[in-house]
Amino acid sequence: MRIVHAGPTTLPVLSELGGAVQRRIVEVATCQVELGHQVTVFSTEAARRGYLHRGIAIEPIRATLPRPWRDYEVLAKLRRRLRDRDADVVHFHGVPDGARWLRGLGFPTVLSVDYFRFRFSGSSIGRRYRRRSLERFDVIAPVSNACSEELQQFWRLSTPRVVVPNGVNVGQFHPMPEAGAAIRRELAVDGCLVLYVGRLCEQKGTGVLLEAWERMGPRTDATLVLAGPVGQFGATPRSSELLDRVERLQVRYLGPVHETRLSALYNAADLFVMPTVRDEMFGMAALEAESCGRPVVASRLGGLVEAVGPDCGLFVDPDDPAALADALGSLIDDPDLRDRLGAAGPTHARRFEWSKIAQEYLAIYERLGQATR
């Protein structure tokens, strides 16, 4: 099968800053190559020539315009690239106008959805345009049941929906005590290490986490470590209210962490926290922490309820710093509970191995191929 993947213009697919969408594209494409399929990934980046990565043909598309116009610049260039090619399916990731821009070329199209709102959908005109764009896809694949329900409630689509969750690379993310111990020595952390990985912003609940930590009072037996960019992916701002609070509370902030260090960082932690306050469609970082055998404290919200196993952590109501402080304190004070919850994580995570996710997408492609014959 000849498969094309195309993602958003925010980051190259192989960006060192990560990004759940970019990671999904690479992991799924890698599995599909291993199964003998011909896979091309279009990536918005500055490279002048295409190259191979794990057997995937990476084709760069150079963009010169700022967003949102660069989105349409890239789609126009993608259409030109695909005009004279044969493909069995074009799989877009978070690109709601993808099928519209390929109309007339005859390719079956799939859209993976990590969020149910898109740019310009706030106005009546923009919403009508976006709805017609979404209706042009053959299949829409939300990343969780929660995402699927939100998508349908917001858009009322007739397009078929098939839930395909995000996944985890269990070969990369698994218990590695020695690697974790090395990171702890590097950070000079004693006692319980509480870890957060993700964007530092209001939506992800960073402020709620900091308030919860402050409520717990000074604890010499625990350290809170934050890793990730401030706001959106990209350069960290020189000043930020969140960073000011981090410094005042003497919380360790590592900034964005390179992909190759993530697994060791998870293994260095005693527990992982994901306190999102709204719009959490899955929770890939929580799943990766579980795969490394770490207990999770997470908001009872959206796709997190699906990503975090019921025996793998504790749930708290979103935007409730008092409840979050209680949950963190209970795990910090009870190493046996941490061990029990953490031990269940790898088994739960194996349900989401990327090889299984790639097979689910292939089943969708094959059904589309049969329908067009």
Image: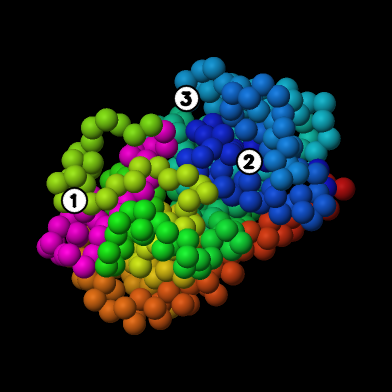
Q: Amino acid at mark 1?
A: Gln
| Residue at the spot 19% in from the left edge and 60% down from the top edge | 212
Q: Amino acid at mark 3?
A: Arg
Label ID, residue 67:
3
| Residue at the spot 34% in from the left edge and 46% down from the top edge | 254
Q: Is residue 68 left or right of residue 4?
A: left
Label ID, residue 92:
2
The range drawn in magenta is 206-234
Residue 263 image point, x, y percent: 49, 57
Sequence-wise first label, 3 or 2:
3
For mark 2, does the 10 Å Cα neighbourhood hold few (<14), some (14 to 19), or many (20 or more) residues?
A: many
Q: Which residue is mark 1?
A: 250
Q: Nearer the viewer, residue 371 or 95?
A: 95
The secondary element bearing badge 1 is classed as loop
Quarter holding residue 162: bottom right
Residue 262 image point, x, y percent: 47, 53
